[in-house]
Image (cartoon, rainbow, N blue to C red):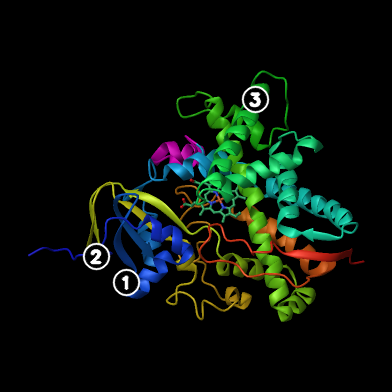
Amino acid sequence: MSDTNQMPREEGIDHSLSLMREGYMYILNRRHSFNSDIFETRLLGKKAICMVGKEAAEVFYDTEKFKRKDAAPNRAVQTLFGKNGVQALDGQDHKHRKDMFMSIMSPEGIQNLTNITKIQWKTALNKWEQMDKVILYEEVKEIMCRTACQWAGVPLEEEDVKKMTKDLAAMFESPAAVGPNHWLGRNARNNVEKRIGELVDKVRNGELKPPEDTALHRFAWHRDQEGNLLATNTASVEVINILRPIVAIAIFINFTALAVHHYPEEREKLESSDEKYAQMFVQEVRRFYPFFPFVAALVKKDFIWNGYKFEEGTLTLLDLYGTNHDHEIWENPDVFSPDRFAKWEGSPFSFIPQGGGDYFMGHRCAGEWVTIEIMKVSLDFLAKRMEYEIPDQDLSYSLVSIPSIPHSKVVIKNVKRKV
Ligand code: HEM
């Protein structure tokens, strides 16, 4: 008799199209129909395993069991990630490269970033006061692009801001797109990789001297375990791994504005509360709204977990959105309630909008602290430092399109600074 069980299995030749069609709900829908936290399916022409929940996250982030090399689909490598970046490394190579990222996430580094973000918000507010209407998503991407480049030591001329913003955004707006939008993403990545690669070369030959604590300086001079500098293109990909996701915080900021609008009682609480409540609010925005749907890895070597066999090389997806909406972890997960974070136990595997596990040893997002701080600054502006109207518009958002962005991109009018 076999000592393993057959996983619930989705029949059929390939379900990549269903994944595209159902987006954030693909894994959750099957979780309900199979009544199981794990199931087998076929994606990109191969057997794949999908998992959701805290226990699943614990095993997914066990580096003895899963690896990242070759796990990401090519369309995501060509747009979102780039080649030879930290996301696809394993073991000591990963640890060494990840330390490079974490070295710029010091308290001083993050404080510096927070200061830059505040100044950029203030400058934008001055401009918005003169504007008839503001499309918040587009404007905040620009704020974030300026912030990201300044923090990373990347020189950005005023006339290049729009193009840089557009290119960095195309990288995260396009991975799941089909047709022209997907190609826009590839093209954008090629442009920016070339541009940042030139800057890396200039740093190395002394033509450009960014401050020492910036990503451009650190990554240009980073040495691998053999003592070699990174290939120019790899250093460029890693600097973009700082710039691109900072621009992507615009998505969370857009959802922050939506939450402030949809829950007026929360806005009142925010007006009279301290930073602790702002932190809880931001955490709830990151839990509640859809952003990064799932992460992918390959089984490193055969193992058995909960009676199920995992075979070497099998593509495995961990559902981030689903875990953040898991009834076993969260009470009324589909209710927006910042207060739940007052008593949250803090497990690295239950609340995983930016991945789970350990920052240094695993692939958890290097920019999670940065994201939280930038969101807090932005929340402070949206809830306390400015007045604005939100005219009638389509504020709904999809649970299918990845990444999900409110359809109207949140239009605001009559913006005024609060004294
Ligand atoms: C905008 C909100 C963000 C979201 C939703 C997000 C989400 C994620 C997710 C899901 C991962 C993969 C975790 C895994 O593979 O297990 C990741 C990795 C990563 N993120 Fe973020 N992220 C965000 C912001 C940022 C920021 C602001 C930065 C940098 C300033 C950043 C830098 C990185 C890096 C370098 C990795 C690769 C880490 C590794 O492979 O070890 N992210 N992020």
Which type of secondary structure does the marked residue at label 3 adopt?
Answer: helix
| Distance from the alpha carbon under mark 1 to that under mark 2 | 9 Å
Q: Residue 379 or 252: which is nearer the viewer?
A: 252
Q: CA distance from mark 1 to mark 3?
A: 50 Å
Of residue 383 and residue 397, the one placed in the foreground of this image is 397
* Camera-nearest residue between 361 and 271: 271
Residue that appears at 89% across and 64% down: 416
236 to 142, vertically: above or below: above
At numbered mark 1, what does the secondary structure look like: helix, strand or loop?
loop
- Marks 1 & 2, CB-CB < 8 Å contact: yes
The residue under label 2 is 7
Q: Which residue has dot 1 on it?
A: 36
Q: Which residue is mark 3?
A: 198
Q: Are marks 1 and 3 in contact (CB under 8 Å)?
A: no
Kind of residue at badge 2: Met
The residues tagged by marks 2 and 3 sit, at their Cα atoms, a distance apart of 50 Å
Ligand 1: does it lie within 8 Å of the C-beta at label 3? no
Dot 2 or dot 3: first in sequence order is 2
Look at the image and give the residue range highlighted in magenta. 83-98
Q: Quadrant of the C terminus?
A: bottom right
